[in-house]
Image (tube, rainbow, N blue to C red):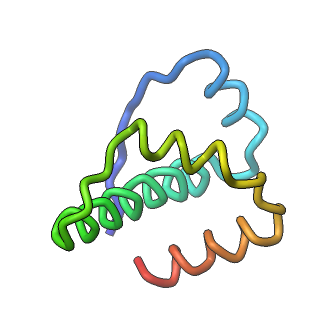
Amino acid sequence: MTAKRSISVPDDVSEWLDGQPNVSAAITAAVRAQMAGGRVDEVMRRAGIEVTEAGKARWRDRLEPMPADVLDAGRRLLDDAA
């Protein structure tokens, strides 16, 4: 089942979406990634690990940018899990 939504986005996001071959798929992938991140945070909280924005920023600074093929593989895993 699908549902139609109308959203407003900033100009930079709109420009990026205009370049996507399937806007619905691009938005769905982004929202699912956000949902998966929230699930990870919840699991960590339940394990007694408090996730903070400052802590996330520290880890982001430590990590090298991921290669595109690794990101694509991660997205496929998230799609399969959904």
Examine the rendered structure and indicate whether residue 58 appears above or below residue 33.
above
| Residue closest to the eye, 57 or 11 | 57
Residue 5 in percent (x, y) is at 35, 40
Examine the rendered structure and indicate whether residue 65 appears above or below residue 12.
below
Examine the rendered structure and indicate whether residue 60 appears above or below residue 47.
above
Is residue 40 rendered to the left or right of residue 21? Answer: left
Examine the rendered structure and indicate whether residue 55 appears above or below residue 46.
above
Q: Residue at 31%, 51% (x, y): give it.
A: 51
Say which quadrant the N terminus sits in.
bottom left
Q: Residue at 82%, 70% (x, y): give it.
A: 69
The quarter of the picture where residue 13 lies is: top right
> Residue lying furthest top in this view?
11
Residue 8 in percent (x, y) is at 44, 22
Say which quadrant the C terminus sits in.
bottom left
Q: Residue at 66%, 21% (x, y): give it.
A: 12
Residue 39 in percent (x, y) is at 30, 65
The quarter of the picture where residue 52 lies is: top left
Q: Residue at 52%, 51% (x, y): give it.
A: 30
| Residue closest to the eye, 5 or 29 | 29
Total count of labels: 0
Is residue 43 rendered to the left or right of residue 78? Answer: left
